[in-house]
Amino acid sequence: MDFKNSDTIPGPRTEDRLPHTAEAAVKIVIVGGFGVGKTTMVGSVSEIRPLTTEETMTQAGIGVDDNYGSASKTATTVAMDFGRITITDELVLYLFGTPGQERFWFLWNGLFEGALGAVVLVDTRRLEVSFDVMGRLEERGVPFVVAVNTFPDAPRYPVAELRTALDLPEEIPILDCDVRRRASSRDVLMTLMRFLHALAMKGALT
Amino acid sequence: MTPPRRQRRSPGPDRPAAPAPPRATAKEDELPNPERLFVIGGEGGGERADIDLVTLIVARADPPVSATPEEAALLRLCAAPLSVAELSAYLSLPFSVVTVLLTDLLAKELVQARAPIVRQKVADRNLLEAVMHGLQKL
Ligand SMILES: Nc1nc2c(ncn2[C@@H]2O[C@H](COP(=O)(O)OP(=O)(O)OP(=O)(O)O)[C@@H](O)[C@H]2O)c(=O)[nH]1
Ligand SMILES: [Mg+2]
């Protein structure tokens, strides 16, 4: 990027600017394997064209937290798409589409923990790529729902069978969706929110 | 046909529970704690402000003449509130690099940071209801 001409850096379009009253943001993470439909889902509900943020991942020697010196290390860039939904004049919701097979994302403190919750997007042709992700969310106490993106040639399983296969308790919602449709993606997010709300009610009672 | 079954992760060393998707090397899985292999961010370390991807940043002033081109670009972008994720996207800079820039700009009081609302043990029901309301309008 040529910062010398920073006047020319394309910023948000006028209609994509947030109001000055925007006070705080919340986030939801959409996590799933390669090609499961994360970007499509973000795009179908986002009010802005999905954007990409990236981070540099450094592979360093074992047991080194800092000062890892010049020991052989390789830097990789990992990218994540995101979109935005303005909730009120004060509140903004961001959706991050995070490749679940990259363990790196789970090391990013606060990416998942700070999120209201997560959507685990699965493709029944490759159910097993989401197993690891679910374990990691459980470990971190991040509430999630499972959305099955229904590809035409994918096997269809009854929800009960999926629940058994995924070893998920009854209260965790599992639903079908077509992430290309805004209404369907919104339903997935609403299901997550209702689930979070039910958890909050339960928490308030105990 | 039945779907493959998930085995719950056993506590302890971090191991994938299921046949993992193809990875660059099989070797890293054999290491006792692969999580330690990865270090986020650039070189140098130093103090970083507590900045989230969805911290909203607002410029408090026009870019001073002393501003670097990166700083000037960033300040122009956040004339209206903008998340750090969006700044990273528009500037084509990694999140950690934007964090470093912002730490400096915050110290110079050239920008204001509006902290995100993160998930609490007991979630704020009013907040959840506001989000549901917003989604319903979509
Ligand atoms: N038939 C069908 N195709 C879909 C659906 N969702 C996504 N696709 C297509 O599947 C492909 C992958 O979708 P993406 O949204 O790019 O998936 P992704 O998870 O972001 O992929 P990566 O970022 O590469 O991991 C695209 O060509 C989509 O058009 C769906 O619900 N049904
Ligand atoms: Mg994608």
Image (cartoon, helix red, strand yellow):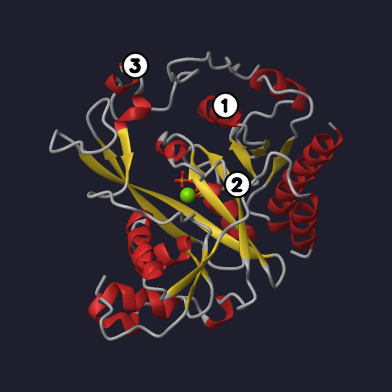
* Position in image of residue A79 (x %, y %): 40, 50
Disc nearer the start of the sequence (1/2): 2
Residue hosting label 2: A115
Secondary structure state at the residue bearing disc 1:
helix
| Amino acid type, mark 3 | Pro
Q: Residue furthest right?
A: A205
Q: Residue A47, which numbered label? A: none
Same chain under badges 3 and 1? The reply is: no
- Asked whether residue A151 appears in the rendered view, the answer is no
Say which residue appears at 22% left-offset and 29% top-offset.
A61
Label 3 with label 2: CB-CB less than 8 Å: no
Say which residue appears at 69% left-offset and 39% top-offset.
B121
In the image, B107 versus A79, the foreground residue is: B107
Residue hosting label 3: B32
In the image, A123 versus B25, the foreground residue is: B25
Residue hosting label 1: A139
Say which residue appears at 63% left-offset and 54% top-offset.
B117
Q: In the rendered structure, the residue with mark 3 lies on which chain?
A: B
Q: CA distance from mark 3 to mark 1?
A: 18 Å
Q: Quadrant of the N terminus of chain A?
A: bottom left
Q: Is residue B117 above or below residue A59?
A: below
Structural crowding at the residue carrying mark 2, measured as other residues with C-alpha within 10 Å and reported as few (<14), some (14–19) or many (≥20): many
| Amino acid type, mark 1 | Glu
| Amino acid type, mark 2 | Ala
The answer to whether A164 appears left or right of A36 in the picture is right
- Asked whether residue B52 appears in the rendered view, the answer is yes
* Position in image of residue A170 (x %, y %): 79, 25
Q: In the rendered structure, the residue with mark 1 lies on which chain?
A: A
Structural crowding at the residue carrying mark 1, measured as other residues with C-alpha within 10 Å and reported as few (<14), some (14–19) or many (≥20): few
Q: Is residue A64 above or below residue A54?
A: above
